[in-house]
Amino acid sequence: MKALVLKAYKQFACEEVPTPQPGPAEVLVAVKACGICGSDVHGMDGSTGRRRPPIIMGHEAAGIIASVGSGVSGWGVGDRVTFDSTIYCGHCEFCRRGLINLCDHRRVLGVSCEDYRQNGAFAEFVAVPQHILYRLPDGLAFEHAALVEPFAIALHAIRRVPPTLNDTVVVVGAGMIGLAVVQALSQTGCGRLIAVDVAGDRLALAAKLGATHIINPAAEDASAATLRLTAGLGADLAFEAVGVTATVDLALRCLRKGGAATLIGNVTPKIEFPLQTAVTRELTIHGSCASQGEYPACLDMLARGALRAAPLISAAAPLAEGVGWFDRLYRKEPGLLKVVLVP
Ligand SMILES: [Zn+2]
Ligand SMILES: [Zn+2]
């Protein structure tokens, strides 16, 4: 089969590799669309240590079952599917509690790190265990279904700390995840929904996707603007989808006393934390990682048009053009959001 292989850091080849065989309880999926994730772009130069070459990356995918391994039940050749980016074991203490994103033995598709190497979906075929499969609703395009993973991350974050009716909510960062959070929040009945980002085009998109207010911290003080909008109180909730000191700090400074922040972004492993703000204002800080069974809800919302993938897709391109797209994303070409590769 054809696959986009990361041969060495920052070095790809679209080449012929052996087609994987589905093992027991696994299916072989013919990949019809696979999104390039920010973590792939960050990982391709070795900076995260989670894309050690050689590796076929890609964990946001949808396709058609091409063959099934032994012991597979309930799934057949021709089924239109997507799958969780995380392969969880189903048996550890955390899986048994339903906390599948916290599985002790979790492996992420398209990731190679110290502990494991799990080839992903930038290829014509990928083998995945049947227990992480989800059926696609009729009429949901593969390219749109491939974006279910970032939406599931957004839904999970909101489920960690759901807004109550008419809450003011700030979303810091209007990249892929931030925009998915904005879209999902717009369905929750929150009152003011404030998107914060330094990129004007992303803010404009956030406004189109449900943000009631947009703030560019390069142009104005975002916490002062939030206070103005809330009669001096501050926001009830904040979702942080970047993960650097400045943006976490900003998220916390936008909150009212007793407010809560949900941290999703983690592009830097460590930040400087505004301890006194958090303690003296009794803020609650939650972490949110990946998703925990939110796929069916997201697929249903995408099929109903309650969540929209199309506005987030900058380009859908053949797999063979993946090398060029990775390069453009790596160079942070302005205006690019999600690129979907089609094997
Ligand atoms: Zn991802
Ligand atoms: Zn487990």
Image (tube, grey):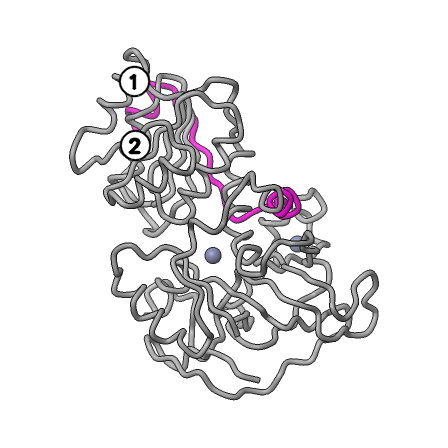
The part of the image, by quadrant, that contains residue 217 is top left
In space, the residues marked 1 and 2 are separated at their CA atoms by 11 Å
Q: Residues within 10 Å of mark 1 (few under 14, many from 20)?
A: some
Position of 86 relative to 151 (above/below): below
Residue 340 located within the stretch drawn in magenta: no
| Residue visible at 59% across and 58% down in the picture | 141
Give amino acid for label 2. Ile
Q: Quadrant of the N terminus?
A: bottom right
Number of numbered discs visible in the structure rendering? 2
The part of the image, by quadrant, that contains residue 225 is top left
| Residue visible at 62% across and 54% down in the picture | 140
Give the residue at mark 1: 229
Which is more toward the observer, 23 or 230?
230
Give amino acid for label 1. Leu
Q: Residues within 10 Å of mark 2 (few under 14, many from 20)?
A: many
Secondary-structure class at tag 1: helix
| Residue visible at 29% across and 24% down in the picture | 277
Q: Position of residue 318 (x, y in %)?
A: 46, 74
Residue 299 located within the stretch drawn in magenta: yes
Position of 243 relative to 18 (above/below): above
Give the residue at mark 2: 214
Image check: 293 left or right of 117?
right
Q: Position of residue 69 (x, y in %)?
A: 77, 74
Image check: 219 left or right of 171?
left
| Residue visible at 45% across and 19% down in the picture | 167
Secondary-structure class at tag 2: strand
Image check: 203 left or right of 7?
left
Magenta residues span 275-300
